[in-house]
């Protein structure tokens, strides 16, 4: 066995032992060598194929630009990409039937580029799960304040751009501390859960509900003017008025106060919307509670 053949044998043995996928791309953007642990690499006839024969136009452009950058700058290039079965039709024919995320590490070797694809799908899924959980209130399942702020900023900016109305409701449970003291914290938790479940049933798909305090919730209403927001507030009051939560300590009935605010024009903004909704909520509570107050005409 010649020195070159021995080197090639060792290289092939190395490819067979690693779990990452390795594609060596030549100067014509064709796969010169492939190997690694991915089943689609073992099954699909990739060697000698142009990237354009394997991947979609968009993904081919991304990969060829990455190779070009590596060749020109002579340094390692890295990125993360999502490969779906739809954007890899050749791989799909040979069993690639689910979406995966890959971290691609490219390095230059003479005129060729060595691309190592590490499957980071599980990490991505975990990050998504953690991000999802960090934006949700664990007790009620509603979004939290951290999730509300960017959504509200973006939605208000869009409403201003297209001159759409939008409104914000703040819903606060009257006497929630006393309710907890009388019936217990577990019953208080059930009240919060029941309120969120009821609002979810009545709200539109585009509406955004978030828990922003112990007993306070925000409901963003796109394409909703002042009168419509007050009508939604009255619906929430009626909804709560019809609720009854049976417990070992007795049936719980509760009330809420609601403050609404409606976008007033291009000089208005998300912060002002929250501020006015808070002010109107305070008026509702100081007026005896179990009522809705909105912006003055």
Image (cartoon, rainbow, N blue to C red):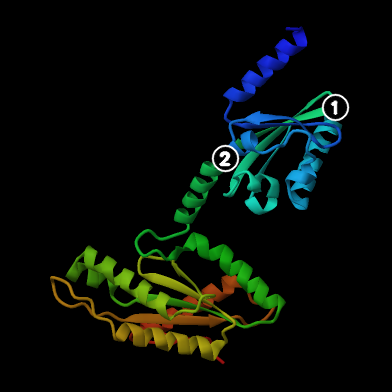
**Location of the N terminus (image quadrant):** top right
Task: Tell me which label, 2 or 1, sits earlier in the chain.
Answer: 1
Residue 190: percent from left, percent from top:
27, 68
From the viewer's perspective, is 114 left or right of 16? right
Q: Is residue 230 visible?
A: yes
For the residues bearing labels 2 and 1, Cβ distance under 8 angstroms: no
**Which residue does the image show at 27% across and 79% down from the upper left?**
254
Q: In this view, does 69 lie above or below 210?
A: above
Q: In this view, does 71 lie to the left or right of 138?
A: right
The count of marks equals: 2
Figure check: 59 above or below 143: above
Residue occupying image coordinates x 64% and y 35%? 41
Residue 14 occupies quadrant: top right
Q: In which quarter of the image is residue 37?
A: top right
At 18% from the left edge and 78% from the top edge, which residue is drawn?
251
Q: Is mark 1 on a helix, strand or loop?
A: loop
The dot on residue 280 is none
Q: Position of residue 141 (x, y in %)?
A: 39, 63
Q: Distance between the residues labelled 2 and 1?
A: 28 Å
Label for residue 120? Answer: 2
Return the residue nearer the eye: 213 or 165.
165
According to the image, label 1 marks what residue? 111
Name the residue at 22% across, 68% down: 187
Disc 2 or disc 1, which is closer to the eye?
A: 1
Pointer 2: residues within 10 angstroms few (<14), some, or many (20+)? some
Res 75 visible? no
Considering depth in this image, is 272 or 107 the residue closer to the camera? 107
In screen coordinates, is 58 left or right of 134?
right
């Amino acid at each position: 066995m010649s020195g070159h053949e021995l080197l090639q044998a060792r290289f092939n043995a190395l490819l067979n032992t690693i779990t990452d996928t390795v594609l060596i791309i030549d100067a014509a953007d064709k796969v010169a060598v492939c190997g690694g642990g991915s089943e689609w690499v073992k099954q699909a006839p990739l060697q000698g194929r142009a990237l354009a024969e394997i991947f979609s136009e968009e993904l081919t452009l991304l990969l060829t630009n990455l190779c070009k950058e590596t060749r020109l700058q002579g340094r390692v290039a890295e990125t993360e990409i999502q490969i779906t079965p739809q954007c890899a039709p050749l791989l799909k024919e040979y069993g690639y039937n689910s979406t995966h995320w890959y971290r691609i590490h490219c390095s230059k070797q003479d005129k060729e580029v060595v691309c190592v694809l590490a499957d980071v799908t599980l990490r991505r899924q975990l990050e998504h799960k953690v991000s999802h959980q960090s934006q949700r209130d664990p007790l009620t399942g509603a979004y939290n304040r951290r999730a509300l702020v960017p959504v509200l900023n973006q939605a208000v900016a869009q409403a201003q751009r297209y001159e759409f109305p939008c409104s914000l409701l703040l819903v606060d449970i009257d006497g929630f501390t006393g309710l907890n003291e009388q019936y217990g914290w577990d019953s208080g938790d059930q009240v919060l859960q029941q309120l969120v479940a009821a609002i979810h049933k009545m709200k539109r798909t585009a509406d955004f509900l978030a828990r922003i305090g112990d007993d306070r919730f925000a409901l963003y209403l796109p394409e909703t003017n002042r009168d419509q927001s007050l009508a939604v507030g009255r619906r929430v009051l009626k909804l709560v008025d019809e609720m009854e939560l049976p417990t070992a300590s007795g049936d719980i009935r509760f009330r809420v106060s609601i403050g609404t605010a409606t976008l007033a024009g291009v000089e208005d903004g998300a912060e002002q919307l929250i501020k006015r909704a808070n002010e109107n909520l305070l008026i509702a509570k100081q007026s005896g509670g179990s009522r809705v107050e909105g912006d003055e005409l």
